[in-house]
Image (cartoon, rainbow, N blue to C red):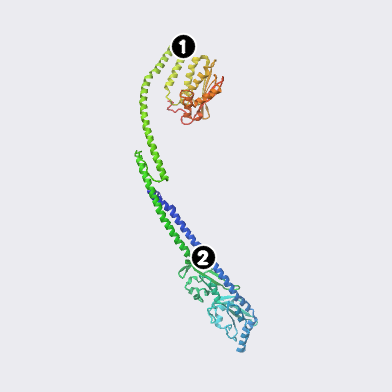
Amino acid sequence: MKGYARKFNDMKLRNKMVWSYMLFFILPFIIVGLFVVQEFRQTALTRATEQAESTVQRVKSRVQEMLGVPVLLANQLSLDTDLEDVATTRYQDVFQVVDAYWSYTKFKVFLDFNSEITRVKVYADNPTLIDNWEFTPLDAKTEQSFWYQSAIGQTGRLGWYYFPSDSRSSSSMLSLVRSVYFQKTRAVGLLQVDVNTNELNAILAQEEPDIVLTDERGVVVASNRSAMMGKKLDEQEWGERLSGLEPGKHELAVGGISSQVIVDALKPENSYNELNIVYVFPLESIMKEANRISVVGFQIISVVFVVALVLIYSICTVLTNRLLKFSKQINKVSMGNFNTELAVDGSDEIGQIKRQFNQMVGSIRELMDEVQASHEQKRQLESKQNEIKLKMLASQINPHFLYNALESIRMKAHLKGEKEISRTVKMLGKLMRKNLELTGKEIELAEEFEIVRCYLEIQKFRHEDRLDYELSLDPSVERAVLLPLLIQPLVENSVVHGLEKAVDGGKVSVRAYREEEWLRVVVEDNGVGMLAAKRESVLRSLADQEASRIGLHNIQHRLLMTYGERSGLTIESEENRGTRISFSIPLEGGKTYASSDDRG
């Protein structure tokens, strides 16, 4: 399977689309077409079979109705005493026989009014009878015949047979036979009623396919084909396979032709044997229309297949040619030629891609021009920065000189016993050293608090008892990291704007603690506070994009850019009640705590 997938992936796009079309459109179309044709053929066969069954039932009903006439006659004659007298009387001479025959006219009357019957004949064990084709003395040949033995053995019941006799003609191929009991002589005779085969043939002739009526031995007694009369089925051109078929539907070759055969049994009232209706119709005649439609369907499928194949091949060829042009232009761009422009006709998806590609190449060209310009500016900037670095190296002597001078002052003050001055100078030097060491990277919260403590100690030296402060740092967040100089400017703001203007000074409180997953920093003073209007003005200044001084705006900007909207400054203030400024930064996110490398 992987090998076939690899081969398919290696094929050209055109061939892939053609094969995909054939597999996912033509093949299902052909399968559906074959299924529809097969269903149509099956439906045609089912409909023809239903029609054939209906025909057999119709023929059966009409034949049974016609056979009801000889059945009625046989039942009536079996009880006829006049018939018994004629058949059983022992005659002295021929004249008595003839006179008895002339006196009995019921056969003639019945035949005149019932065309379904061609002859009535009575066999009696009476040697004085003369055979006049109506009354016949019983002889040994007749007595040994199969039909006579069967009828005598089935007392009072009817049998239906074809059997050769001198009275048999083409219009009389089926006879009803039954035994007749003569009460006066306690003898048994036999009644034979010949059915009019012409009328049976007329019933069958109304049906177009071959249909025959046979007795229980398979002899054809009626048919819509006259050549089959009086012969057994296995002697016909249909072949031996039809002989002995059970009632039902059968599909087999009849005369070398695939055919549907329906066999149905017909058993008249009070009969001891059956007649069979055999209906044969070739499947070719049924499937002729279905086959014609199948051929037309396959022709249409073939034409659609060829036309669709040509169209899809043409479309795929045009599409792949356009994509090849596109590929060549992409290769040029990949080699660094951004002055090329893709020329592909059409306003379809590929045309849209062409326009977007040209726009992209143009944008890249513009960006490259901008990058080149930026590189030029950067080069010039680096040149200026190099100049500034030289100046900075020269100017670095000033802070170091100042720091060394402060250290000398501190030592002299310490030697002279001015411990407070010495301690303050030490704090100022430490504060300057911390500021010199800051590089802009995040520092630990404990280090930021140390900077705040140094600043407050210096301010306390200036203001003496007017300034008091309190630092509260939760030990669980000492190692938390944050941007440098976020808290010291807030403390400076409280001292300068909150306490220096207060007559009695005040107190600055700085607290840092954990609040769920956040570090909370609060700078609070009890100084002069602010009016509501002033507070609103300060809040507006925090969002002022033009503000550039290091102060509240700078802190606000750094907090928002680094930690998000939730970390902005919160200012609460009331006049003569003090000011409370706070912010929160997340304790999670990869830079919550200093790494082992940062901690040294």
Residue in view at x 54 percent, y 67 percent: 53
Q: Nearer the viewer, residue 88 or 287?
A: 287
Q: Say what secondary structure mark 1 lies in.
A: loop
Using the rendered image of the protein, determine whether residue 561 is visible from the camera's viewpoint: yes
Which residue is at the far top? 416
Residue 41 lies left or right of residue 378; in this view the side is right
Instruction: Look at discs 2 and 1 and give the one toward the viewer.
Output: 2
Q: Position of residue 257 (x, y in %)?
A: 46, 68
Q: Position of residue 27 (x, y in %)?
A: 43, 55
Q: Nearer the viewer, residue 81 or 549?
A: 549
On the rendered image, what quadrant is the C terminus found in?
top left
Q: Position of residue 262 (x, y in %)?
A: 52, 68
Marks 2 and 1, how far apart at CA:
131 Å
Dot 2 and dot 1 residues touching (CB under 8 Å): no
Q: Amino acid at mark 1?
A: Glu
Q: Which residue is mark 2?
A: 48
**Vertical placement of 58 versus 461: above or below?**
below
Residue in view at x 45 percent, y 17 percent: 428
Q: Say what secondary structure mark 2 lies in.
A: helix
Q: Amino acid at mark 2?
A: Ala
Q: How many numbered marks, from 0 up? A: 2
**Vertical placement of 369 versus 13: above or below?**
above
**Vertical placement of 74 versus 385: above or below?**
below
Q: Which residue is mark 1?
A: 418
Using the rendered image of the protein, determine whether residue 6 is visible from the camera's viewpoint: no
Q: Nearer the viewer, residue 36 or 159?
A: 36
> Mark 1: few, some, or many residues within 10 Å (few <14, many ≥20)?
few
In the rendering, which numbered label is found on residue 316? Answer: none
Residue 125 lies left or right of residue 355; in this view the side is right
Q: Nearer the viewer, residue 495 or 387?
A: 387
Q: Position of residue 590 (x, y in %)?
A: 46, 31
Mark 2 or mark 1, earlier in chain? 2
